[in-house]
Amino acid sequence: MKRLKSRRTLFFLALLIVMAAIVPVTAAAEVVYTTNTQDADGYLVWTQPAYYPVGIIGQDLTVPDKDNPNVMKPSPMQNPKDVFIDSRDHVYVADTGNSRIVEFDKDGKFLRYITVPESPLNKPEGIFVTKSFDIYIADTGNKRVVHLDPNGKLIKEFKRPESRFIPASFKYDPIKVVVDKRGFLYIATLGGYQGLLQLDPDGNFQSFFGANATQFGFLDSLKRMFYTKEMYANEISKLPGSISSVAVDKDGFIYTTTAGQTVTTNQIKKLNTGGTNMLHRDNEANKDNFGPMRRMDARYVSGQGTLIPQLIDLCIDSNGNITAIDSSYKYISQFDSAGNLLYFWSGPSSASTTQLGMMKNPVAIDANSLNDLYILDGQDNVIQVFRLSEFGQKVNAANKLTLEGRYEESEKPWQEVLRLNSNYTPAMLGLAKAAYKKEDYETALHYFRLGGSHQGFSDAFWQIRLQWFQKHFSTLATVFVVLVLLYLFWDKLTKNMKWRVRWRNRQRSNKAFIVQFKHVFYILKHPIDGFSAIRFENKGGYITALAILALAYVAQVISTLYTSFSFNKTVLSRVSLIMILLQFVLIWFAWVISNYLVSSIYRGEGRFRDVFIGSAYALLPMILVGIPLALISNFMTTSEQAIFDFLTKAMQVWVGLLFFWKIQSLQNYSVGETVVNILMSLFTFVMLAVLSTELKDFIIEVYQEVRLR
C-alpha cells in the first residue's frame, strides 16, 4: 500500500514536471502603479498601463581589484545624473559619483567604462552621443564639455567661452549638453537663468538660447506701481527659472525642461531655430500648463500638500512623443509632439525597498529605437526599463496618424482605443477630427464636446449652422417678409377700432408693486434721478428688490448652465445650484453690509433700506442682457467671440456704473467721494471674507476637538 502511494506521488510529480516543460512560462513584471490621464478640465481619468517595467540594468557593475587584478569587486554607480541611448541602442550613463561614463549594449550588458585617462573626468553630469558615435560629456567638476571620439579618446574640450556678451557673473558649470546636426552645442549650466549656452563647433559663443521669462505676480505689479526706484532697487532680484535639461529630436527641435518652486507654466518647451516655443496653444484654457499640473497631486503624496512639479529631464521617442520625469512626485508624464498629455504613471517607491516600476529619485530618462524607456534612479543607482503595453502601442499608432493629418485612417485605431477605455480623452478628440474630416459634423460635435475641445466644437457647429442656413434660408426669408406684411396690414386695419382705443386710453395701475417695478426700468434711463427717488420718494420696495435678486440668481444659473459650450468653460457635471445660490447671496449681502457700514461712517445719507434696494436694482442688466446672451450664444460660434465678449463686458460695465450712480445718489456724494467709498467698501468686503474664513476654520477645529474627545 505504501509502495502504491509512493508510486502515485512520483507519478504526479513527473506529470507536473512534464507540464511545466510543455507550457511556456511568461515572465512579465507586475505593474504596481496606476496609469492616469486628464480630461479636458484637468481631472483624473484612469487608463490601462501604457508602459510596464521589464527589468533593471546597472546593478552588477564590477572593476578589477587593485591588489588582485584577476579578482573583480563590486563597483556600483554612485549618484548618476544622466542617461543617453545612441542609434545602436547602446546605453550611456553619466556615473557622476565615480567620475566615469558607463556604456551598456542594447540588451543591458556592460561594455566599458569611459574615463578619459589623458584628462580625467571630474563628476560628469551630462552625456550626448552623435550619429557618428562621437561622445560629448558635460564634465561639471572640471567646468568644461569634452568631445571624445568613438573610442573614448579626447578630441577637444570646450571651456568657458570668451565673449563680451557673457556677463561676468555667469557661472560656467555644464550639467547637460546636446549637439545638433550642424555640430552646434547647446549647454545647460547649473543655475543658468540666461538660457542655454550656444557654441559653434569651434567653441565660439553664439548666443544664449531659449531663456525663460521672469514670472511676475500681482504683488510684483503693485510694487512696480508704488515703489520708488530706490525702494525697488532694495528688493531681491527676481530671476527666471533655470533650464534643468535639454534634448534634441530627429528634426532638430531643441527641447528644454525648467524646474523651480516659482515655475508653474511652460515647464516644457519645444524650440525652433529662432528660439520660439512651439508648444504654445492659444485656443485652449490651459494653454501654458505643460507638465503634469494635476489637481489631485496631494492625494499621492500624503502629508506634503500640493507641490509644484519639478520636471528635471525629458526625452523624445521615434513617434515624437515627449516623456518627462517629475522629481517632486516621482511621476513619468508622456505628451504627444503637439504637447497634449497622453498619460502619466509610476510614483514614489518605498524608502526601504526597491520596487520595479517605482522610483526613489528619478533623475534622467531616454528612449531607444523600440520606444522602450530607460529611467535612471539616482538613489538606487540603477536604470529601470519600461516597455510599451498593447494599449500604449494602440494609442501611439492612432495618435501618429492623427498628428500626420491622416484622420480617416486614424478612425479605426481610435475606436479600438476607445473600446479599451471609454473615458480616454485623446481618443475622443481623434475620433472628432476623423468625423470632421469626413464631414460628419454631428458626430464631430459630439466627440469634441466629450473631449473638451471648445474650438473644435465651435468649428463643427459652424459647419452645421452653415448647412442649415443654406437649406432653409429661402423659407426663412419668405416667412419673415410675410409676417412683416401681415403686421403692417393688421396694424392699419385695426388702428381705429374701439378695443385698441380703449387699450391706449386704459387707466394705469397705482398698486405699489407695479409702481416700484416700473421704477426699476426708469432707473435704467435716468439712474441718478431714479436712485434719488428711492431715497426721497420711497419709490423702491423690499418685495421688488427680492424679486430682482431672485431673477438675478436665475440669470446666473442660466448663464452657467445654458451658455454654449463654445464659450462656456464651466464643468457642468460639477455645478451645484445650492453653491451658486450661497455664493450669490453671500457676496451680494456682504457687499450691502460693507457699503452701508462705510457709508454710515463716511458722511453718507442713505439708510440700510436704500442700500439694500438700490444694490438689488443695480443687478437688472444681469437679467436683461445675461439671460438672452446665454440663450443666443447657442446659435453663435467662436468666430463671433468678439461680439459675445463685447456684450458680456458691456453688461458688467453697465452693472458697475449703476452701482456707482447708486452710491453717488443715495449717499449724496461727489464723484471723488464715491470713488473713495467704493474702495473702502471693497476693503471692508475683503476683511469680512477673511474674518469669515477664519471663523469657519475655528468652528471646524472646535468641532474636531469635541469629536476626538
Image (tube, helix red, strand yellow):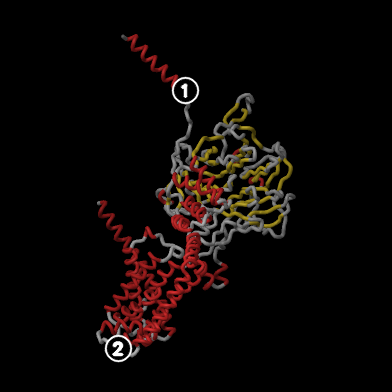
663 or 242, which is in the foreground? 663
What number of labels is visible? Answer: 2
Query: Residue flagged by tag 1: what amino acid is it?
Result: Ile
Where does residue 287 sit, x and y in percent of width and height? 52, 59
Query: Residue flagged by tag 2: what amino acid is it?
Result: Glu
Q: Is 211 on the left or on the right of 5, as rendered?
A: right
User: First in sequence: mark 2 or mark 1?
Assistant: 1
Dot 2: element = loop
Position of residue 123 relative to residue 39, above or below, is above
Residue ID for mark 2 = 537
- The answer to whether residue 468 is seen in the rendering is yes
Position of residue 434 relative to residue 59, above or below, is below
Where does residue 310 sit, x and y in percent of width and height? 51, 51
The part of the image, by quadrant, that contains residue 555 is bottom left
- The answer to whether residue 41 is seen in the rendering is no
Residue ID for mark 1 = 22
The part of the image, by quadrant, that contains residue 678 is bottom left
